[in-house]
Image: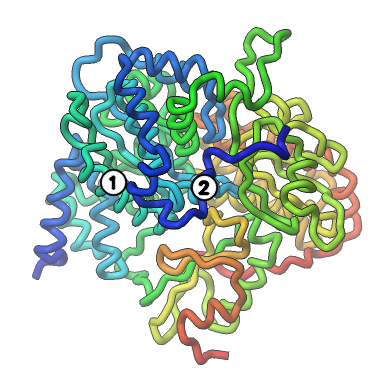
C-alpha cells in the first residue's frame, strides 16, 4: 500500500508549476505529509523522492536539517505545543512554565504525553515578544501563558 | 518631534477589517502601485534609491543599490524573494504588519517586482506565523480577483505571481542565501558570496531578497514621495562620505522588563531611553535597566550608561554594539543576572547554528557549555578568557565563517564581557548557582 494518498500526491504535483525546479516542492510536500500523519515515514520519503525525481537521501537530508519534521520513530501527539524559551519570554518566566509543564506531564521537551494528546516542545523566539511568555498550539499563537494554559491544551488530568 | 509623529506603517493597524482589500482601497491603498505603473521601471528604482531607504531586516543595506546590482538586459526570469523569516529574538514587527495590514506589504512586492523586472515573487514565511500565512493566502486571492496580480495587471501589460512558501523553524533561513537554499528544497546552508543573489540567486537566476518592513516602506515612498520619507529620521553625516543616513520611520519592538511591551513606529534615531520611558511605560516594578539589547540579541548590549544612544543605523555601533539590527529592544532589569541572559543568548545560537562552518558550530556550542558550567557554580576565571577567544575567532569579520550568524553569536559575548565583567568575576568567585532553573532533557 502506498504511504501517500492519491489526494496528497496530486496536491504535491499541483505545486510543480509554482517553481522552476521540482526539488523546491520538498518543504511543501513534507509539510503536507506531516500535517496529515504527524510524522514522515521512510516510505513517504521515498514516494516524495519519486514524485520530485530525487534520491530519497536528498529528501532525508533536507528533512533532517529542520528539527521541525518528525520521522516515523518520533510521531507527534494530537497537538503540538511549542513553548518559547528565548530571551524575551525567558525574562518573563517562560523557563518556569516549560519546566513545570514537563514535570507535571512527566515528559521531557520533545516527548508526547502517554495518552497521545500533546507533544511539548521548546521553541526559539516565536516572534510574539510583546506577549511573553507565549506558545504555539500547532501554528496558532497564545500569549501571556501560564502552566495551567499549557496543561489545559491536553485536557490533562495529570498532576 | 517623536511625540508628534503619526504612524504610517502602522496607520491601519487595529482598524476594523484592516486586512481586506476593500478597506485598503478605501483608505487609498494601491495608490503607490498606480503611480509606479505610470513610470518606467528604472524611474521607480530611482525613486527608491533617492529615498536612501535602507533594508529593515538587520543589515541596513541601501535598497536602491541592491536593486541596481541586477545585471542589465537579463534574458530569462528574475525573482524577488520576500524575507518573512523574522526569527531574531525580540523581533515581531513583520508579524504585526502582515497580520493586520497584508496589502501594504503585497503592494510593495508588486512595486518591487515591476521596478526590478521580476516575474515571480516567493514569499518565504516562517512556519510559526500561521495567522500571517492564512491572512496572506486570503489577501493574495483578493488581489488576483481584482487584477492586482496575475496577467496584465491593471491593463499595463505587467504580469506577476506571488507564491507563499512556508519555512520549517530555522533561524538561518533569515540569512538571504540560506533562505534561497531552503526555498530550493535543500538544507538552509548559506552560500559563499560572491556570486551575490543579484547575479545568481534563487534557481540560479538573478534575485533580489527584501525584508517585509522594507517593502512596506517602498509602498509608502511611492505613495507619499521621497521628500516625505527624507523628512523623517537622521540625515547623512556630512563628515562621513560613506554614510547614507537613517531616513524614514522604523518599527521598534520593545519587550522584556517594561510596563508596556509593544510595537512602536517612530522616526529612526529615537534613543533607547525615550523609547523605554516615553513609549513602553518605563522599566517594570520600579526597577532600573541593567542592560538593553538595541536590535535583537545578536546586536549585543547597551549598558545602563549608554541608554541615550540614538537607535539609528549608526548609533549602536558607536558604543560597541554590532548595529541597529532589527530594532528589537529588549530591556533587562537590575535584578536579573547577566550570566543568565548571556547563557540564554548562547543557547539560542548553539541551537540555531546551521553547522556548516566549524568555528560557528563548535564556538556557539562551547560558549553555551561554558556558560552552563558557570551557572552551575563550576566556573573558572579562565573561562572568561576562553569565551573572549571564541567570540573573536568566529564570524565574517575575523574571516572564518560563510555567513554573519557567528558574528551575531559572538557580539553578545563580547559586549557582556566588556561591559559587565565584574559581575561575571563576582559570580564565578562566589561559586553560586543560577536561580533560573532550566528544564532537563532536549529534543
Between discs 1 and 2, the one toward the N terminus: 2
Q: Quadrant of the N terminus of chain B?
A: top right
Q: Is residue B49 left or right of residue B429?
A: left
Of all chains, the one bearing label 2 is B
Residue topped by disc 2: B87
Q: Is residue A157 left or right of residue B395?
A: left
Q: Residue at x 52, y 78 (%)?
A: A107
Q: Residue at x 86, y 57 (%)?
A: B287
Residue B279 screen position, x and y as percent: 72, 48
Q: Is residue B327 left or right of residue B167?
A: right
Which residue is at the front of the view, B175 or A108? B175
Vertically, is B1 above or below A89?
Answer: above
Residue topped by disc 1: B140
Which residue is at the front of the view, B345 or B292? B292
Badge 1 marks a residue whose secondary structure is helix
Picture quadrant where residue B399 is located = top right
* Residues indicated by labels 1 and 2 sit on the same polypeptide chain: yes
Residue B301 screen position, x and y as percent: 74, 41
Vertically, is A4 above or below B302?
Answer: below
Query: Does residue B168 appear in the picture of this structure?
Result: no
Badge 2 marks a residue whose secondary structure is loop
Q: CA distance from mark 1 to mark 2?
A: 23 Å
Q: Residues within 10 Å of mark 2 (few under 14, many from 20)?
A: many
Q: Residues within 10 Å of mark 1 (few under 14, many from 20)?
A: many
Q: How many marks?
A: 2
Picture quadrant where residue A89 is located = bottom right
Closer to viewer: mark 1 or mark 2: 1
Which residue is at the front of the view, B307 or B265? B265
Q: Residue at x 12, y 50 (%)?
A: A13
Instruction: Evaluate if marks 1 and 2 touch, with contact meaning CB atoms under 8 Å apart.
Output: no
Q: Residue at x 62, y 65 (%)?
A: A133
Picture quadrant where residue A30 is located = bottom left
Amino acid at each position: 500500500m502506498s504511504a501517500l494518498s492519491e489526494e496528497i500526491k496530486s496536491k504535491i504535483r499541483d505545486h510543480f508549476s509554482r517553481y522552476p525546479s521540482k526539488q523546491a516542492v520538498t518543504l511543501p510536500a513534507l509539510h503536507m505529509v506531516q500535517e496529515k500523519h504527524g510524522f514522515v515515514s521512510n516510505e513517504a520519503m521515498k514516494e516524495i523522492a519519486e514524485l520530485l525525481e530525487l534520491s530519497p537521501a536528498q529528501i532525508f537530508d533536507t528533512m533532517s536539517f529542520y528539527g521541525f519534521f518528525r520521522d516515523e520513530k518520533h510521531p507527534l501527539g494530537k497537538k503540538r505545543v511549542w513553548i518559547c524559551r528565548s530571551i524575551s519570554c525567558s525574562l518573563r518566566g517562560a523557563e518556569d512554565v516549560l519546566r513545570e509543564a514537563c514535570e507535571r506531564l512527566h515528559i521531557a521537551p520533545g516527548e508526547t504525553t502517554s495518552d497521545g494528546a500533546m507533544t511539548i516542545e521548546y521553541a526559539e523566539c516565536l516572534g510574539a515578544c510583546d506577549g511573553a511568555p507565549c506558545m504555539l498550539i500547532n501554528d496558532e499563537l497564545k500569549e501571556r501563558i501560564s502552566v495551567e494554559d499549557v496543561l489545559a491544551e491536553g485536557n490533562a488530568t495529570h498532576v | 518631534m517623536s511625540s508628534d509623529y503619526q504612524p504610517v506603517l502602522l496607520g491601519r493597524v487595529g482598524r476594523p477589517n484592516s486586512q481586506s482589500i476593500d478597506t485598503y482601497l478605501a483608505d487609498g491603498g494601491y495608490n503607490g502601485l498606480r503611480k509606479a505603473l505610470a513610470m518606467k521601471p528604472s524611474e521607480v528604482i530611482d525613486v527608491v534609491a533617492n529615498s536612501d531607504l535602507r533594508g529593515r531586516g538587520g543589515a541596513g543595506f541601501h535598497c536602491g543599490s541592491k536593486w541596481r546590482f541586477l545585471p542589465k538586459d537579463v534574458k530569462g526570469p528574475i525573482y524577488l524573494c520576500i524575507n518573512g523569516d523574522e526569527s531574531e529574538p525580540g523581533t515581531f514587527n513583520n508579524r504585526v504588519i502582515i497580520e493586520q495590514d497584508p496589502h501594504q506589504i503585497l503592494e510593495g512586492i508588486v512595486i518591487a517586482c515591476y521596478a526590478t523586472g521580476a516575474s515571480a515573487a516567493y514569499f518565504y514565511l516562517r512556519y510559526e506565523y500561521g495567522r500571517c500565512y492564512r491572512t496572506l493566502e486570503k489577501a493574495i486571492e483578493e488581489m488576483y480577483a481584482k487584477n492586482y496580480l496575475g496577467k496584465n495587471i491593471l491593463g499595463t501589460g505587467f504580469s506577476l505571481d506571488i507564491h507563499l512558501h512556508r519555512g520549517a523553524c530555522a533561524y538561518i533561513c533569515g540569512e538571504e542565501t540560506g533562505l534561497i537554499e531552503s526555498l530550493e528544497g535543500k538544507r538552509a546552508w548559506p552560500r559563499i558570496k560572491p556570486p551575490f543573489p543579484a547575479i545568481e540567486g534563487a534557481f540560479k537566476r538573478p534575485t533580489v531578497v527584501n525584508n517585509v518592513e522594507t517593502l512596506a516602506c517602498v509602498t509608502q515612498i511611492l505613495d507619499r514621495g521621497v521628500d516625505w520619507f527624507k523628512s523623517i529620521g537622521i540625515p547623512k553625516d556630512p563628515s562621513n562620505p560613506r554614510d547614507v543616513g537613517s531616513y524614514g520611520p522604523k518599527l521598534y519592538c520593545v519587550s522584556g522588563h517594561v510596563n508596556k511591551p509593544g510595537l512602536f513606529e517612530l522616526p529612526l534615531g529615537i534613543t533607547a531611553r525615550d523609547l523605554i520611558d516615553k513609549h513602553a511605560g518605563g522599566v517594570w516594578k520600579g526597577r532600573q535597566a541593567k542592560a538593553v539589547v538595541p536590535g535583537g540579541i545578536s546586536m549585543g548590549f547597551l549598558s545602563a550608561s549608554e541608554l541615550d544612544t540614538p537607535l539609528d543605523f549608526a548609533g549602536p555601533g558607536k558604543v560597541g554594539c554590532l548595529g541597529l539590527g532589527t530594532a528589537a529592544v529588549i530591556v533587562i532589569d537590575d535584578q536579573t543576572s547577566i550570566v543568565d541572559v548571556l547563557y540564554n543568548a548562547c543557547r539560542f545560537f548553539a541551537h540555531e547554528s546551521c553547522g556548516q562552518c566549524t568555528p560557528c558550530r563548535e564556538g556557539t556550542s562551547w560558549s553555551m557549555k561554558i556558560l552552563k558550567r558557570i551557572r552551575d557554580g563550576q566556573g573558572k576565571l579562565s573561562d572568561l578568557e576562553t569565551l573572549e577567544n571564541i567570540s573573536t575567532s568566529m564570524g565574517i569579520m575575523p574571516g572564518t565563517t560563510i555567513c554573519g550568524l557567528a558574528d551575531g553569536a559572538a557580539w553578545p559575548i563580547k559586549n557582556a564581557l566588556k561591559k559587565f565583567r565584574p559581575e561575571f568575576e563576582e559570580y564565578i568567585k562566589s561559586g553560586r548557582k543560577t536561580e533560573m532553573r532550566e528544564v532537563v532533557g532536549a529534543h
